[in-house]
Image (cartoon, helix red, strand yellow):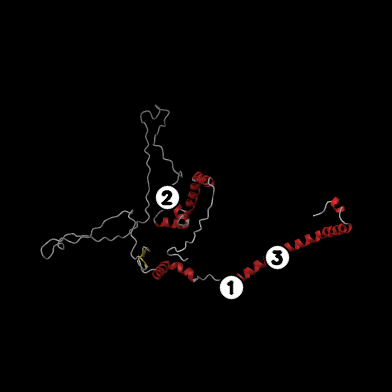
Amino acid sequence: MALEPATLQQLDPHIRSYIEELERHREGARPADARWEKKYHALKVRHDALEEQLRLLLYKRFCRSSEQESVEQQQLFNEAEKTVNETESNSETSEPGATGETITVAEHSRKKSGRKSIDPKHDRTDHLHDISDEEKQCACGATLVRIGEETREVLNVVPLQIWVDRHIYPKYACHTCEGSADEDKPAVRTAPREPDILPRSIATPSLLSFILVNKFVDHLPFYRQEKRFEQIGVSISRQDMSNWTIKVAGKLQPLIDRFADLIRSGPLIQSDETPMLVMNEPGRAN
């Protein structure tokens, strides 16, 4: 930092001369500093380019260069076998759908075997498998008495079902006056149409929900959904599904804006939900 002229005059002549000499050297070094800084930036750009070339050469030299599938990729097509093998090696039972619950006794803990029960909220259809009337007769002459039953539950799935809702609007007209007696109303009368989320489209809320859940929750692309619809005899192109998605997003924009307002109204927008390792937690390495 340069000294004030008045302060400089108060110093010893030798010190003042030394400071003035330093100032002249500093001013003379400014052009050289600018040149060195320019050379530094040029060398840095060159260094980054050479480092990128080296990385590319190392990748070509040591990384895979063929399209041959690796062992890990091949296992994607053997998911069922791979999952069963892992289950058999990590569990005491190979029963599908094992509960995985742990039973703790005084001496040790062990896995609880057996199939996990089906959720009771699902509908049940009973199929009675009874013995014949002849088999209900005992050799002593008495009739067998029902003392209990054995129950076995199996799970059924109904494939995708498609049906068409036909909305019929009868037309009414007066053959006597042909509508001239009531000019405030149309000559041909029909019931008003219910509002649609996408007017002049075959898409219903249930169909849109099905397509959007497949796309954004199950990660099923539109071209695969198009093939699935073709398999059940329905023609819905991926272009139609794309257009419907964009239009539905526009319809939902007020709801999205409301969510954004609610998020911004709080003191925090994001939080760290990284799980913490708890000491002595069952089933976890500490």
Q: Residue furthest bottom?
A: 61
Determine the image quadrant of residue 124.
Answer: bottom left
Which tag, 3 or 2, sits closer to the chain's start? 3
Q: Residues within 10 Å of mark 3 (few under 14, many from 20)?
A: few
**Circle 1 is placed at which residue position?**
62
Residue sitting nearer the eye, 16 or 21? 16
Q: Is residue 204 visible?
A: no
Q: Quadrant of residue 43?
A: bottom right
Q: Which mark is residue 23?
A: none
* Element assignment for label 3: helix
User: How packed is label 2: few (under 14 Cα within 10 Å), some, or many (20 or more)?
Assistant: few
Residue 58 at x, y percent in the picture: 61, 71
Foreground residue, 44 or 175?
44
Q: Is residue 4 left or right of residue 202?
A: right
Q: With respect to residue 33, does 166 lie above or below?
A: above
| Residue at 50%, 71% in the rendered image | 70
Tag 1's secondary structure? Answer: helix
Residue 197 image position (x, y, % from top left): 45, 44
SS at mark 2?
helix
Q: Which residue matches tag 2?
A: 207
Q: Nearer the viewer, residue 88 or 19?
A: 19
Q: Is residue 35 visible?
A: yes
Out of 2 and 230, give the one closest to the viewer.
2
Which quadrant does the N terminus fall into? bottom right
Sequence-first disc among 1 and 3: 3
Observer-side mark, 3 or 2, equals: 3
Q: Which disc number belongs to residue 46?
A: 3
**Could you say where residue 249 lies in the image, as x and y percent from the top left?**
50, 48
* Drawn side of residue 119 relative to residue 6, left or right: left
Q: In the image, what residue type sits under mark 1?
A: Phe
